[in-house]
Amino acid sequence: MTAEGRRTGLAVAVPDEADSILAPWRGRYLAESVERGIPAHLTILVPFARASEVTSTLHLSLGELYASLPAFDYDLTEIRTFPDCAWLAPEPSAPFDELIAAIRARFPDYPPYGDSEVEPVPHCTVGVTDDAETLGLMVEELEAGLANALPLRCRASEVTLWRELDEGRWVADAVYALGS
């Protein structure tokens, strides 16, 4: 992939304390993502601008946008599913909805997941599979393994712009403080 074709995305990384609790499960059920450097997170917008479109003006705009939105506390409370993944639900989810709505309003040319019809659901993915039976077993194991750890208390104090490298790894490109 050329530098111009590299993707970017915006996410709130899960704090280290919560990430360390999720790490064994993500390593088991999201090994490819972990190997590519993607931390436990809640997606705000992906895909975002191509790496070649990320300019100082874009960074300033993102910094201003996120500085105008407050930092907030949330808990990762329970395991839920989509047809292909198990995820943790944030409570409250409204602040994540606000982060998503703000970026959509500021950058309407970048719809979530590349589809303007999608209404994103804030979530922290813990495992993926394309097999319904495997998903059921995954959820059972996660519920048993995380029963004493949930809820995971977290604070969202920044949004990170992630950039994909040539070999498919992702790195933090910039961090924007909330409410600064």
Image (cartoon, rainbow, N blue to C red):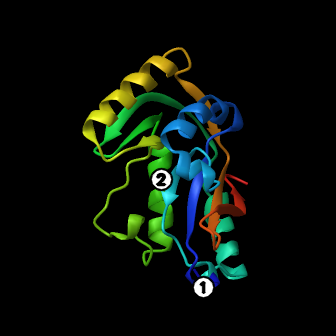
The structure residue drawn at horizontal position 55% and vertical position 82%, both measured from the top left corner, is: 5
Residue 128: percent from left, percent from top: 41, 44
**Disc 1 target residue:** 4
> Where's residue 16, x and y in %?
70, 37
Q: At 52% from the left edge and 71% from the top edge, which residue is drawn? A: 48
Q: Amino acid at mark 2?
A: Glu
**Camera-nearest residue between 13 and 128:** 128
Which dot marks residue 76? Answer: none
Q: Secondary structure at mark 2?
A: helix
Against 151, residue 23 (above or below) is below
Q: Which residue is mark 2?
A: 98
The residue carrying pointer 2 sits among few (fewer than 14), some (14 to 19) or many (20 or more) residues within 10 Å by Cα, namely few
Apparent side of residue 20 relative to residue 130 in the rendered image (left or right): right
Residue at 60% over, 28% down = 153
Q: Quadrant of residue 137?
A: top left
- The answer to whether 55 is drawn above or below residue 133 in the figure is below
Q: Identify residue type, mark 1.
A: Glu
Q: Residue furthest top?
A: 148
* Quarter of the picture holding the C terminus: bottom right
State whether residue 38 appears in this view. no
**Which picture quadrant has residue 56?**
bottom right
34 displayed left or right of 56? left
- Label 2 near label 1: C-beta < 8 Å? no
Q: Is residue 87 left or right of residue 153?
A: left
Closest to the observer, 115 or 67: 115
Looking at the rendered structure, the secondary structure element under dot 1 is: helix
* Disc nearest the viewer among 1 and 2: 1
Residue at the spot 62% in from the left edge and 41% down from the top edge: 14
